[in-house]
Amino acid sequence: MPDAQETLAIAFELNSAPIEATVEPQTPLIDLLRERFGLTGTKRSCDVQVCGACTVLLDGAPVSSCTVPAFEARGRVVLTVEGFAADEGSSPLIEAFVNNAAFQCGFCTPGMLLAAKSLLDADPSPSEEAIKDYMRGNVCRCTGYKKIVEAVHEAAEASR
Amino acid sequence: MRPFRLHEPTTVQEAASALADAGGGAALYAGGTELLLAMKSGLLAYDTLINVKSISGLDAIAADGNSIVIGASATHSAVEHDPLVRDRLPLLSEVEHGVANLRVRNVGTLAGNLCFAEPHSDPATLLLVYEAELDVAGPSGSRRIAVGDLQTGSYETSLGPDELLTAVRVPAFQAGVRAAYSKFGYHHRPTLGIAAALAVEDGVVADARLALGCVSPVARRLSRSEDVLRGERIDALTEGASALREVSRLASEDADAVEDMHGGVDYKEHLVRVFMERTLLRALAKNGGGDA
């Protein structure tokens, strides 16, 4: 049995590019993304997995990067809002958020977009109920949720 | 967060040995959704975390006779969406969908939720009415305990310092059981959870299982309330029926509610009375259509 590790060499896919990094076990994924790779689109807010501002997709599933350790990315696929924005397939969601003014300060928006992408990947035609259910773990403190729900709905329609 | 080392055993025995060797300086790590928050805030500190996800096969979900066996590293989302769980334990799937938020469910595990023994937990309450059992492994072998024998207090369990929970075994309800789960609260975690499973034969409650959680340090079965329900005709159990009032009154008496950030004792006892009746009415309304 190998001894307990104080550092780990990990390899994973970050925004479609292969990445290698050495991390300490206690380093949260958000620190690796923001401080090592300069991907500051991922926002730290509540730091306790409640608000969703730090949402990234790990193998396509939303996780809170404020708390998930960086080593959990080993051998997996990480998508941040920067990788999302660089993908042509993301334009319907981005345009729908702009068209519907689905943000004010924008701090929650990276997490909202990634949660919405994950929803539409799993269910391309979600009902309003399904959108609210899926997105309820992402908190916005300025604009309210109506325009966000409408934007996700519009993006689903536009992608059809 | 204070630095820690990561230990990645490949077998349950290695994990148990590592726990024993660490003499309290190590903790098991699965999803980390509760453990890492406590470590970030400085409430807990460990030199080593032992990653149970490195043990292959521990995330399996499989049928064993009438039970579904859920491995210790299966996440809430994996349990919620598993075809076997949806088919045979639909109420568990429904309750798992309501745990925390999507991101926590994608990472946190059912077994970890039970072992962390946070009092405000939905699964700990629900699994009491399923009469789930737990497989516990240590250096000298394994044992099986009732789910109700795991938690002994807030954040406390009966597990030995070198033992780990390896699987949660959940028997499906028998045909004709009507079951429902209610949760209530304004915080991130539930303030109250009530689970009810009623076996109905010829229009009569043949057996009743009721569990109450979150309002006290440990979730519990409500045997006095269950006794009142047994033998009752279900067509008499309508809103405001005296038997339902009696069940709810006994439930609030037996709650042993404690004051915490979710509210005072009187408030919680009131919630118990209101939600016990509602939960029973919801269960009865299911009309034998399975458990969800």
Image (tube, coloured by chain):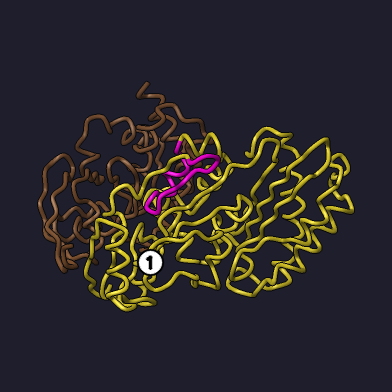
Chain colours: A brown, B yellow
| Vertical side of A105 occupied by A89: above or below | above
Vertical placement of residue B265 versus A100, above or below: below
**How many circles with numbers are drawn on the protein?**
1
Position in image of residue B10 (x %, y %):
24, 56
Give the chain of mark 1.
B
Tell me what residue is drawn at x 88 percent, y 43 percent: B236
Q: Which residues are magenta?
A: B64-82
Looking at numbered disc 1 in the image, what kind of residue is underneath it?
Answer: Leu
Q: Quadrant of the N terminus of chain B?
A: bottom left
Q: Where is residue B197 drawn, in percent x and y?
A: 69, 47
Does the stretch in magenta take in B80?
A: yes
- In-image side of B258 versus A36 (left or right): right
Could you say which quadrant of the image residue A50 lies in?
Answer: bottom left
Quarter of the image containing the C terminus of chain B? top right
State the residue in front, B269 or B30. B30
- The extreme front residue here reads B140
Q: Could you say where residue A46 lies in the image, as x and y percent from the top left?
A: 38, 63
**Membership of A21 in magenta stretch:** no
Horizontal side of residue B266 vs A70, given as left or right: right
Near mark 1 (Cα within 10 A), the count class, few <14, some 14-19 or many ≥20, is many
Look at mark 1 in the image and give the residue it sits on.
B35
Q: Where's residue B122, x and y in %?
A: 56, 56
